[in-house]
Image (cartoon, helix red, strand yellow):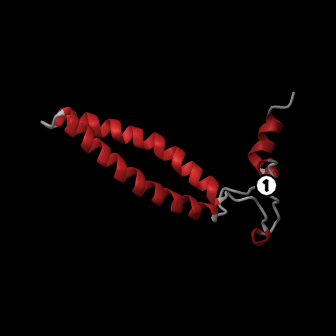
Amino acid sequence: MAYNKPKVEDNKDQLVGVKDSPGRSLAKAVSWRIIASITTFIITFIVFRRYTDKTLNETLETSFWVLFFDVILKIIIYYFHERMWTNILWGKYWKRYYWKQRAWKRLYRKMHKD
């Protein structure tokens, strides 16, 4: 699949670009939740095992339920958060020649000429 670079116009109202698809947002949400949920499970297991008198099976069951609710709720929240950021232009489109226009860069080059 070819990547289409966003076109940048002088007027932000006329910006045409590529947004993340809902499927991509969902895939990112799922991959992050796997990593974060494994971390949550391990932390929950260690805390319950160390600071409670629960048996190993009870600790595993408690950790599983924390993991279950953590995955369901946070994947939904993350998906909507990702969709919201898809519609925010800030930081998404910028002109390559932006930094070339900065005075400090010109001054630096002038000072370091051979």
Residue 10: image quadrant is: bottom right
Tally of marks: 1
Quarter of the image with the C terminus is: top right
- Residue at label 1? 95
Q: Position of residue 35 (x, y in %)?
A: 47, 40
Classify 13 as above or below 52.
Answer: below
Q: Please report the residue visible at 34 percent of the width from the left and 35 percent of the height from the top.
A: 42
Toward the right, the furthest residue is 114
Classify 106 as above or below 7.
Answer: above
Toward the left, the furthest residue is 53
Q: Position of residue 40 (x, y in %)?
A: 36, 42
Q: Position of residue 90 (x, y in %)?
A: 65, 60
The three-letter code of the residue at mark 1 reads: Lys
Q: Position of residue 20 (x, y in %)?
A: 67, 57
**Relative to 64, 90 lies left or right:** right
Classify 30 as above or below 15.
Answer: above
Classify 54 as above or below 75.
Answer: above
Q: Please report the residue visible at 26 percent of the width from the left and 42 percent of the height from the top.
A: 61
Q: Please report the residue visible at 67 percent of the width from the left and 58 percent of the height from the top.
A: 21
Give the secondary structure at mark 1.
loop
Toward the front, the furthest residue is 57
Q: Please report the residue visible at 60 percent of the width from the left and 55 percent of the height from the top.
A: 25
Q: Residues within 10 Å of mark 1 (few under 14, many from 20)?
A: few
Toward the viewer: 8 or 114?
8
